[in-house]
Amino acid sequence: MKRLVFAAAASALLASCGTEAEESTDGADAGGEAASGDLSMAEVAERAEAASVKPQPGLYRSQVELVDADIPGAPAQAMEMMRGMMDRSFEYCLTPEEAEGGYEQMADQSQEGDCSFQKFDIDGGDIDAAMTCDGGGGPVSMTMQGTGTETSADFTMSMKGNMGGTGEGSMTIRAQHERIGECEG
């Protein structure tokens, strides 16, 4: 599910939360309980594992769109250049191993680095999540809402915080994924 959910996000500044799965208990006590109202990794993994929807392996087409961005001091030309870099379509192969990881793998990957979940709710294929990551310039708050089925996903991710040292800004990205066939060779 790593690619199915976060492929677009990684290219859209969510890289501050990492891309490799890691068993981390940062911010948690020895019992796995998170400090300051954050969800522990165990809680997030339990919620993710309970999700009944897992994607099918296969070839997927992804459409990523920069919906909105407010970056302090950025000229209009820079915003259009950013939109040109982020608005894109691509195809990728989701392996059986990645598909089996489902939402639990997504949760694991999001916990690497300096990120913590404040919310991670899954109801069937509906996801509503909120996290905070330290992107180096200060905390960045992120929310993600959307749906995932066995053959498609449609998510909107919003970020607010210090955008690269320029001050408080925001960005919203929509990523749509659709299974279009079997992977080649």
Image: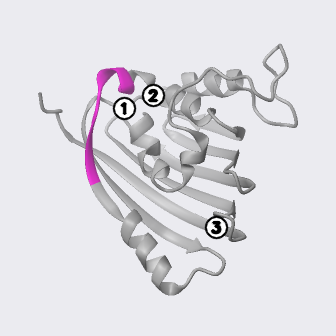
What amino acid type is highlighted by mark number 3? Ser
Mark found first going from the N terminus, 1 or 2: 1
Spot the residue most to the right.
36
Residue 102 numbered mark, or none: 2
Residue nearest the observer in this picture, 134 or 124: 134
Q: Do the residues labelled 3 and 2 touch (CB within 8 Å)?
A: no
Q: Where is residue 61 in the image (x, y as percent from the top left)?
A: 26, 48
Residue 149 visible to the viewer = yes
Residue nearest the observer in this picture, 78 or 23: 78
Q: In this view, does 106 lie above or below 166?
A: above
Distance of mark 3 from mark 2, alpha carbons?
28 Å
Q: Which of marks 1 and 3 is in front?
A: 3
Q: Helix or strand or loop: what does disc 3 sit on?
A: strand
Residue 55 numbered mark, or none: 1
Q: Where is residue 155 in the image (x, y as percent from the top left)?
A: 48, 51
Q: Helix or strand or loop: what does disc 1 sit on?
A: loop
Distance of mark 1 from mark 3, alpha carbons?
30 Å
Q: Residue at x 30, y 22 (%)?
A: 96
Q: Which colour scheme is used?
A: one colour
Q: Are marks 1 and 2 in contact (CB under 8 Å)?
A: yes
What amino acid type is highlighted by mark number 2? Gly
Q: In this view, does 35 lie above or below 83?
A: above
Q: Which residue position is annotated with label 3?
A: 170
Mark found first going from the N terminus, 1 or 3: 1
Q: Are marks 1 and 3 in contact (CB under 8 Å)?
A: no
Distance of mark 1 from mark 2, alpha carbons?
7 Å
Span colored in magenta: 90-99
What amino acid type is highlighted by mark number 1? Pro
